Image: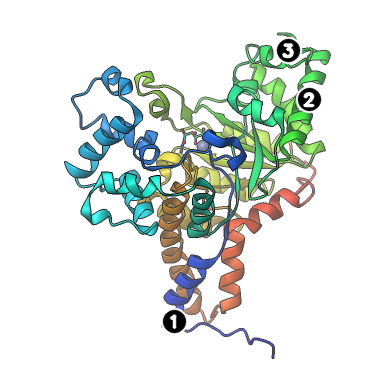
Amino acid sequence: MEQVDQAVSSANLPDRVNAIVAQTAVFDIHTHLYDPAFGALLLHGIDELLTYHYLTAEMFRHTDLSYGAFWKLPRSEQADHIWRRLFVDHSPVSEACRGVLTTLNLLGLDTGKRELPAIRKWYAEQPTEALVDRCLNLARVEHLCMTNSPFDLEERRVWTRGFHRDERFVGSLRIDPLILEWPQAGSHLSEDGYQVGDVLDETTIRNIRRFLEDWSDRINARYLMVSLPPDFAYPDQAASTKLLDRAVIPHCQENDLPLALMIGVKRAVNPALRLAGDGMGRADLNALENLCASHPQAKFLCTALSKENQHELCVLARKFPNLHPFGCWWFTNTPSTAKEITKMRLELIGLSVTPQHSDARILEQLIYKWTHFREVLTGILSEKYADLARTGWVVTDAEIQRDTTELFGTAFEHFCDTPGPCVLPAA
Ligand code: HDL
Ligand code: ZN
């Protein structure tokens, strides 16, 4: 007998939303994880969790160790120091610290004992392949996008050698050096046999496009991605404009691939912090507006690092159907900021958005990054559906499931797979 799609009473709404959001699988569209075939590049374990660059940056606010003295320590001693300073000596209230505890707790470990050696002992008994399945299942992650860089020598070796793909790990082509460091990046292409020169002439552009074709095919890229500084300008006289206009965007359009723009990162504001040393700035989103307007048939995914850019990004998405906002990126991925951004997005652009990605660098982080965001989204959807119920529009179970599935990946896939989303009306 056909299941009747029941309207959900206001009394049951929070529980139904909670149950559906908790069990709906997600397509995590941006991570720094790797297919298990990449071996040690797929980070996991308690020492990696504790020395994640978010915690390292926080630890330096609670230590008398010099940068150099800390970096000289073996990874396990760095982890010991972070555990002591950020968990034992001070309650672990930050999102990155709480994330470690959420992860350990959901993996079945007793964090209350505060015993790092017992945690290490548990990890020593876990086979990696089992841990991959366990983490993806606990996080309800069905697919995730890796960050694949042809400019990363260690990663390139694995792609060149070839391997059997785990279909859960989807490729994305990361091209920061190409866009931001031309002509220095050209040497990587020349070494690979692509005839390129410093000047972006016809031959160089043709070979850059061949490079993009070859790597997009090799990794079966779902999209191309670049992170950009707050002062990124478009169009302007820099090489980035010519590379985007004549190589990257034509490549994306011809292969029906979105270009993902992550705007607002200031690299190495404190180099002594190494990977933890990047900062942020409020970006000039005129560049994004100009890109969307001058390339109406191209598709742009975009996330901004500054909280102050989020409203502008939503309004631009209202103006340009070829722009799809995604994620609460990095410094905006805290419960309070993620709630503010996600509510703003639903209120301004409805469900045509991908509200979160994990940005996970360590396998087990999938567990906390998605558990914490599901809590945020449950609260927001419950509130929004209650608002609708007060107008007489009572959502059904199937509609809650449809909406959640959309936010957790099908809106992204529809955006990627719909040919040339929109042609702007003739001026
Ligand atoms: O550029 C990026 O993709 C950022 O996400 C950086 O990798 C950053 O270090 C990070 O891990 N943020 O979460
Ligand atoms: Zn990232």
The C terminus lies in which quarter of the figure?
A: top right
Tag 2 or tag 3, which sits nearer the N-term? 3
Q: Secondary structure at mark 2?
A: helix
Q: In the shown orientation, is residue 112 left or right of residue 214?
A: left
Q: Going 44% across and 56% down the picture, which residue do you hit?
A: 373
- Where residue 12 is drawn, which disc sits there? 1
Task: Find disc 2 in the rendering and name its residue.
Answer: 209
Task: Find disc 3 in the rendering and name its residue.
Answer: 190
In the picture, residue 351 is in which quadrant? bottom right
Q: Identify the amino acid type marked 1.
A: Asn
Tag 1 or tag 3, which sits nearer the N-term? 1
Q: Going 71% across and 48% down the picture, which residue do you hit?
A: 416
Q: Real-space Cα distance between discs 3 and 2?
A: 13 Å
Q: In the shown orientation, is residue 304 left or right of residue 27?
A: left
Q: Identify the amino acid type marked 3.
A: Ser
Q: What is the crowding at mark 3: few (fewer than 14 residues within 10 Å), some, or many (at least 20)?
A: some
Asked whether the viewer can see residue 246, the reply is no
